[in-house]
Amino acid sequence: MGRVVGREELKNILEEAKREGKRIVFTNGCFDILHIGHIRYLTEAKRLGDILVVGINSDASVARLKKGRPIVAAEQRAEVVSNLIMVDYVTIFEEDTPYELIRSLRPHVLVKGGDWKREEIVGSDLVKETYSLPFVEGISTTEIVKRIKNISHHHNKIEKGK
């Protein structure tokens, strides 16, 4: 299990790990509602190195990027992700993209989900090894939210019909 740390502390931790010859893998996302796609993707990301770092968008960042989100607060999302066995460190970033975080941390490997083309992955110009990993078709936080809304809408229609 990992832990949630600030940017500067994480930078220091990773510099020491690099001196020890460890390979650092970085990925990022909102991780608003954790699902099997996230688990498979993070498991595969961890296989690419020794230390897996996950950057999580702050609440303000998510709100700018995704209408009506986040559903879960950043501190809670970070705690959940940090408790996954394959994750070593989590940090929250305020910017819309993790570009400056990646520039600061200088990981060996950069990873995103398969819905990203390799050349479109933010930070790929900074990191030699960049991968777009396969994702589980039809499974996304957006799809899960849509299903919940549909169930709720259907339930409300039934309740009103009583």
Image (tube, rainbow, N blue to C red):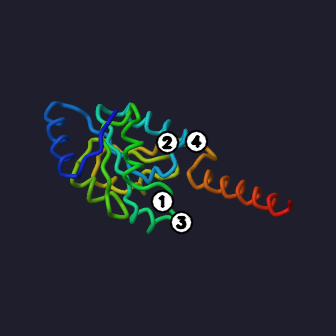
Check if mark 3's residue and mark 2's residue have beta carbons within 8 Å: no
What whole-number distance in Å separates the C-alpha atoms at marks 3 and 2?
21 Å
Q: Amino acid at mark 2?
A: His
Q: x and y percent of residue 123 in the render? A: 32, 55
What secondary structure is marked by label 4? loop
Q: x and y percent of residue 20 in the render? A: 15, 30
Which of label 2 and label 1 is nearer to you? 1
What secondary structure is marked by label 1? loop
Sequence order check, earlier mark of 3 and 2:
2
Which residue sits at x=76%, y=56%? 155
Residue behind mark 4? 136
Position of residue 149 relative to residue 28, above or below, is below
Position of residue 59 relative to residue 91, above or below, is below
Task: In the rendered structure, find residue 38 and report the number of the disc placed on it.
Answer: 2
Residue behind mark 1? 70
Which residue sits at x=30%, y=49%? 91
Which of label 2 and label 4 is nearer to you? 2
Q: Amino acid at mark 4?
A: Val
Q: Amino acid at mark 3?
A: Gly
